């Protein structure tokens, strides 16, 4: 069984709360995603979420992560435990930037184009990743 974290990185601006999203060019990849990936065997889901956020965004400072939801996905080849984590940003970040992923067997070296979506607008976000965005609106 594999464990995955999906990370909702947010920041506050005068217009409201924003969610960090990215795009990249990979066959069969959803158009818009949130950072995330496989949780290592020795990591907690929250630790894995923070590590994945750092690797996939280049950001380094966050407030306390909060687990929003857990799900188990049963696929034809494997079962995946999924953890949806809210991770408030604790540093200033640009409105958009590109980042070369620093680790991960599948993503290392990929270029992610990151930007902020003002909530509740999550147009184009992969439905599995958008599923718990409503928890970020309060």
Image: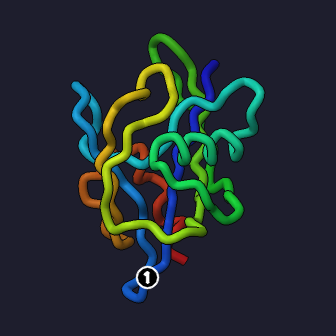
Residue 71 lies, with reference to residue 13, above or below; the image says above
Residue at x 40%, y 53% (from the top left corner)? 130
Residue at x 63%, y 61% (from the top left corner)? 62
Q: Is residue 106 left or right of residue 83?
A: left
What kind of element bears circle 1?
strand
Residue 49 lies, with reference to residue 16, above or below; the image says above
Graded by Cα atoms within 10 Å as few (under 14), some (14 to 19) or many (20 or more), the crowding at tag 1 reads few
For the C terminus, the quadrant is: bottom right
Query: Which residue extends farthest top?
Result: 77
Residue at x 35%, y 65% (from the top left corner)? 116
Res 127 visible: no
Viewer-closest of 109 and 105: 109
Colour approach in the figure: rainbow
Q: Is residue 21 left or right of residue 62?
A: left
Q: Position of residue 110 (x, y in %)?
A: 34, 32
Residue at x 31%, y 38% (from the top left corner)? 111
Res 77 visible: yes
Residue 106 lies, with reference to residue 99, above or below; the image says above
Viewer-closest of 125 and 109: 109
Q: Is residue 86 left or right of residue 101?
A: right
Residue 63 lies, with reference to residue 132, above or below; the image says below
From the image, tell me which residue sits under label 1: 13
For the N terminus, the quadrant is: top right
How many marks the image carries: the answer is 1
Q: Position of residue 115 (x, y in %)?
A: 32, 60
Q: Position of residue 15 (x, y in %)?
A: 37, 86
**Within the image, what quadrant is residue 128 found in?**
top left
């Amino acid at each position: 069984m594999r464990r995955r974290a999906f990370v909702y990185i947010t920041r506050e601006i005068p217009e409201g709360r924003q969610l960090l999203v990215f795009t990249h060019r990979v066959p069969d990849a959803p158009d818009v995603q949130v950072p995330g990936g496989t949780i290592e065997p020795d990591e907690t889901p929250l630790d894995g979420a923070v590590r994945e956020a750092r690797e996939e965004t280049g950001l380094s400072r966050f407030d306390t992560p909060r687990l929003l939801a857990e799900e188990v996905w049963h696929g034809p080849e494997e079962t995946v435990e999924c953890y949806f984590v809210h991770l408030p940003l604790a540093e200033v970040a640009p409105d958009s930037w590109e980042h070369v992923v620093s680790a991960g067997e599948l993503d290392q070296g990929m270029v992610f184009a990151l930007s902020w979506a003002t909530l509740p607008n999550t147009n184009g976000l992969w439905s599995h990743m958008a599923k718990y965005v409503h928890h970020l609106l309060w």
